[in-house]
Amino acid sequence: MSKIVEEVEASNLNYADDFGSKKDLKSKPARRFAILTCMDARLDPAKFAGLVEGDAHVIRNAGGRASEDAVRSLLISYKLLDTKEWFVVHHTGCGMETVTDKEIDEIFDIKDSSNINWLTFKDNKKSLVEDVLTLRNHPLVPKSIPIYGYIYNCSSGILEEVKEATLAGQSK
Ligand code: ZN
């Protein structure tokens, strides 16, 4: 067994020892909101946004982009599980800002352009606004859901609101 597997299993047993009333949690998020953010290991949404188990949905991918699958998850989040507010959180120093789609194709040794849209970006704020607008303009996303745009600062731990993004995502 790998060292990591051993560590994860041991940590999990510790966690489960103290599970208590968490067995009664409902699948609908108690605080009725969702966060779409990057998978970057430096970000811990439970800590930076004050979540405990059962509070909220956290959807993560490379870049925190409003990809097809992120949209799918958020639609389920709202329609089946009653979330009423969404946050899109990008962050400083995101790896997806430092490469291009073409460069990732090259890293994989893909000669022609690949079928994967890697969703890299050059301008963090601009890409955040784009992601908020992708959600805001989706025909299945109700206008009543406000979508807030933030950039998490990896140097300070602060969630910095990007007004332009939040404005683009305001409910109507
Ligand atoms: Zn990132």
Image: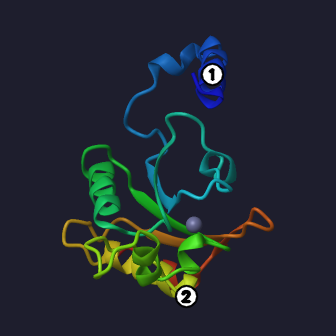
Question: Which image quadrant: the C terminus?
Answer: bottom left
- Amino acid marked by disc 2: Asp
Q: Is tag 2's residue or tag 1's residue first in the polypeptide sequence?
A: 1
Q: In the image, what residue occupies the spot 63% across and 11% down?
A: 17
Ligand 1 quadrant assignment: bottom right
Residue 156 in sight from this viewpoint: yes
Q: Nearer the viewer, residue 8 or 111?
A: 111
Q: Nearer the viewer, residue 142 or 65?
A: 65
Neighbours of disc 1 within 10 Å: few (<14), some (14-19), many (20+): few
Neighbours of disc 2 within 10 Å: few (<14), some (14-19), many (20+): few
Q: Quadrant of residue 146?
A: bottom left
Q: Quadrant of residue 134?
A: bottom left
Q: Is residue 7 above or below residue 67?
A: above
Residue 151 shown left or right of residue 31 in the figure: right
Q: Secondary structure at mark 1?
A: helix
Q: In the image, what residue occupies the spot 32% across and 53% down?
A: 73
Residue 14, position in %: x, y? Answer: 67, 17
How many numbered tags mark residues here? 2
- Amino acid marked by disc 1: Glu
Q: Is residue 95 above or below residue 165?
A: above
Q: Nearer the viewer, residue 151 or 67?
A: 67
Give the residue pinned by disc 2. Answer: 123
Residue 161, position in %: x, y? Answer: 62, 75
Q: In the image, what residue occupies the spot 26% across and 66% down?
A: 141
Question: Which image quadrant: the N terminus?
Answer: top right
Residue 90, position in %: x, y? Answer: 56, 70
Q: Is residue 167 above or below residue 52?
A: below
Mark-to-mark CA distance, 2 and 1: 40 Å
Which mark lies nearer to you, 2 or 1? Answer: 1
Residue 49 shown left or right of residue 142 in the figure: right
- Mark 2 and mark 1 residues within 8 Å of each other at the beta carbon: no
Give the residue pinned by disc 1. Answer: 6
